[in-house]
Image (spheres, grey):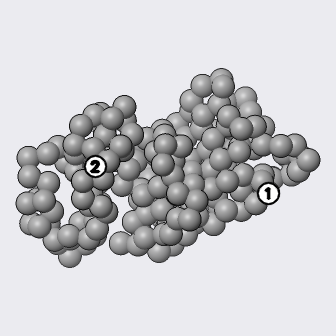
Amino acid sequence: MTDLSASPAHLTPPADVVLALDTATPFLTLALTSPGGEQEECREVGRAHAEQLPGAVQTLFARAGLHLRAATVVIGTGPGSYTGVRVGASYALGLARVWGAQVRGVPTLEALVRGDGPQAVSLDARKGHVYGAVYDVRGGVVTGVIHPPQKHSLDAFEMLRGTLPHHQEGRPSGLALLRAGLAHGQSDWTLSYL
């Protein structure tokens, strides 16, 4: 269990400390930025997000030499399993309430982008379908949406992406999620499910 009292309530969260987390995939994906640098962790946990998330966040802050407190929390909004997506969202909202932080949502698919240029990303939506999008990426951050996140048949998505690079079912990047959240994360986000 996370001891939120370790960060006194009267302290204003440091504006330059940002936490990102995603629990929509089988991976527990975290990132933290501060003036002291960047920290990132991504580990496969299956369905054990709820059990491992609090301790992993505490460890991430400790590794960075920071108090457990941030001004912004970026959350991956899915698509993912109902329980997985809600674990991360609930935890992020709880932290934000205690810290007085803002929460910005970003589609989990944006944590799959790599490099620069137009590219397709997707997650398995079962029964011959994927949940995918096609993005334009610059500096490792989505700068344009060519085809918005949507459920497609495998064949339809292959036709949609054409010859573009396709990143699928890979290890999400917490830093890509964090940077997307800072660049264009939404404060009025909603969760999406596979």
Q: What amino acid does circle 2 point to?
A: Tyr
Q: Quadrant of the C terminus?
A: bottom left
Q: What amino acid does circle 1 point to?
A: Val
Q: Nearer the viewer, residue 154 or 138?
A: 138
Q: Is residue 99 above or below residue 125?
A: above
- Visible in this render: residue 149? yes
Residue 113 image-quadrant placement: top left
Residue 137 image-quadrant placement: top left
Residue drawn 63% across the image and 41% down it: 18
> Which disc number belongs to residue 135?
2
Q: Is residue 39 above or below residue 23?
A: above
Residue 11 lies left or right of residue 142; in this view the side is right
Q: Of callouts 2 and 1, which one flags the residue occurring earlier in the amino acid sequence?
A: 1
Q: Is the residue marked by circle 2 packed among few (<14), some (14-19), or many (20+) residues within 10 Å?
A: many
| Cα distance between the residues tagged 2 and 1 | 34 Å
Residue 159 image-quadrant placement: bottom left
Residue drawn 30% across the image and 53% down it: 145
Residue 133 lies left or right of residue 39; in this view the side is left
- Visible in this render: residue 28? no
Q: Is residue 172 above or below residue 95?
A: above
> Which disc number belongs to residue 98?
1
